[in-house]
Amino acid sequence: MGAYDAELGAAVERAQQGDEQAFARAYRLVHPGLLGYVRGLVGDDAEDVAADAWLEIARDLGRFRGDGAGFRGWTATIARHRALDHLRKQRRSPPTTLIEQDVLEVPGGQDTAAAALESLSTGQALELIRGLPREQAEAVLLRVVVGLDGPATARVLGKRQGAVRTAAYRGLKKLAGRLAQGGATP
């Protein structure tokens, strides 16, 4: 992750000086892992939640201080807050009607077989992770999908490093057990 974080840190620094291409580079480096993390928290609403997080990240970029690894942790913290806000809002909001769902499910223009096959395995993995207890799922997502180290994961979750290490270990052990038993569903 050293070269990756160095490239990310340089892109963030240039982006803070107004370089739009550098911000686009930082986005391309961070977004896939961040989206996977958010998808593990909120499921199908991940794109919207991640978009809200990126709006906040872009707005507050000038306040960020740190390197590439720190930027990944900072963006994960913002995304986590947006995801938790989204989940709280869902609990308060009435479910959509069937007519509203039909309107909301208009197909996009990039529905290809290759994209479906690629997202299938990712989707299955994230669904397995979502089947874990929340603390374990978040620790696994941040460590494996986002690629944060133990201290950064602990900061994002507001927990001690030992608690995060234990949660990630238990989550990965449960996932390995489910896969060994052939139980690819949570």
Image: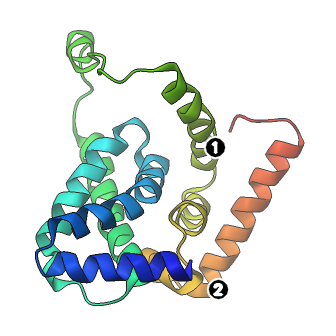
Rendered position, 66 above or below 53: below
In this figure, which residue is indicated by the disc labeled 1?
A: 125
Instruction: Using the image as rendered, state which of residue 186 and residue 145 is in the foreground.
Output: 145
State the scheme by which the image is colored. Answer: rainbow
Name the side, left or right, on which 7 lies relative to 103: right
Instruction: Using the image as rendered, state which of residue 94 and residue 43 is in the foreground.
Output: 43
* Disc 2 residue crowd, few under 14, some 14–19, many 20+, Cα 10 Å: few
Q: Give the SS element for disc 1.
A: helix
Give me the disc on residue 76: none
Marks 1 and 2 close (CB-CB < 8 Å)? no
Q: Position of residue 185 (x, y in %)?
A: 70, 34
- The amino acid type of the residue labelled 2 equals Gly
Q: Which quarter of the figure is the C terminus placed in? A: top right
Nearest to the eye among marks 1 and 2: give it.
Answer: 1
Ranked by sequence position, the earlier of labels 1 and 2 is 1
| Residue lying farthest to the right in this orientation | 181
Rendered position, 137 above or below 154: above
Q: Is residue 153 visible?
A: no
In this figure, which residue is indicated by the disc labeled 2?
A: 162
Instruction: Using the image as rendered, state which of residue 90 and residue 102 is in the foreground.
Output: 102
Q: Is residue 65 visible?
A: yes
Q: What's the residue at 60%, 77% (across, down)?
A: 164
Q: Give the SS element for disc 2.
A: helix
Q: Quadrant of residue 140?
A: bottom right
Q: Position of residue 163 (x, y in %)?
A: 62, 80
Q: Quadrant of residue 23?
A: bottom left
Name the side, left or right, on which 85 lies relative to 6: left
Q: Which quarter of the figure is the N terminus placed in? A: bottom right
Q: Position of residue 93 (x, y in %)?
A: 22, 36
Q: What's the residue at 21%, 53% (across, down)?
A: 52
Q: CA distance from mark 1 to mark 2?
A: 25 Å
- The amino acid type of the residue labelled 1 equals Ala
